Image: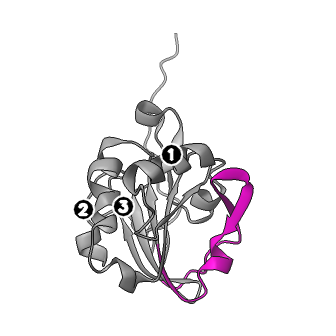
Amino acid sequence: MMLATARRLPLTRSLAGHRRLFHASAPLLVNVGDKLPNVDLVEGSPGNKVNLANELTGKGLIIGVPAAFSPACSENHIPGYINSAKLKEAGKVFVVSVNDPFVMKAWAKSLDPSGSSGIRFLGDPSLAFTKALNLSFDGAAIFGGDRSKRYALVIENGAVKEAHVESDNTGLNVSAADKVL
């Protein structure tokens, strides 16, 4: 009977100079200076395409949420912007969610029945916009599929001026109206 013996093999390459691939905080996925992706979203109906790269050539704000009608989104996040006295200073404001245009239209009517805030609600049903910004996450356990992280992007001349992305994907801290406006 032959016994197998284990032996330690020498390390064949040096690890000196290699970067550490872990961080104390989550990496920011969309960067300041990034141009908005040339991707169509939908507003009100599938045929009404909206391209934020074309819409936001001046000053603006994109608020990303994991799900329309979810508690944090409906009770705190979006109402914080709707009710802010500083909203008008933000320029054109859009809420984007991984939902169809019909859900987004109904959600807009429930949060801002008169439309007086001027905020536009856009659907990203295929996640194309969200993925182009690297802001999607696996939300299957809560939402049934991939969703958008909660975020707020301050836009100037079609590029990201400030990025406020929640490190835990769904919390409400850095993307809240009082931190962004």
Q: CA distance from mark 3 to mark 2?
A: 23 Å
Q: As drawn, is 134 to the left or to the right of 151?
A: right
Q: How many marks?
A: 3
- Disc 3 and disc 1 in contact, CB within 8 angstroms: no
For the residues carrying marks 3 and 2, which lies nearer the camera in this image?
A: 2
**Within 10 Å of the Cα at label 1, are there few (<14), some (14-19), or many (20+) other Cα atoms?**
some
**Residue 145 visible in image:** yes
Q: Quadrant of residue 22?
A: bottom left
Indicate the amino acid at tag 3: Phe
Q: Which mark is residue 173?
A: 2
* Residue receiving disc 1: 106
The residue depicted at 38 percent of the width and 53 percent of the height is 111
Q: CA distance from mark 3 to mark 1?
A: 42 Å
- Dividing the picture into quadrants, the one containing residue 162 is bottom left
The residues colored magenta run: 32-61
Q: Nearer the viewer, residue 13 or 81?
A: 81
Q: Nearer the viewer, mark 3 or mark 1?
A: 1
Looking at marks 3 and 1 on the same chain, the residue that comes earlier in the sequence is marked by 3
Between 146 and 5, the one lying in front of the other is 146
The residue at the point 66 percent across, 48 percent down is 126
Q: Earlier in the sequence, mark 1 or mark 2?
A: 1
**Quadrant in which the C terminus is drawn:** bottom left
Dividing the picture into quarters, in which one does residue 179 lie? bottom left
Mark 3 or mark 2: whose residue is earlier in sequence: 3
Helix, strand or loop under label 1: helix
Measured as percent of width and height from the top left, residue 178 is found at: 23, 72
**Amino acid under disc 2:** Asn
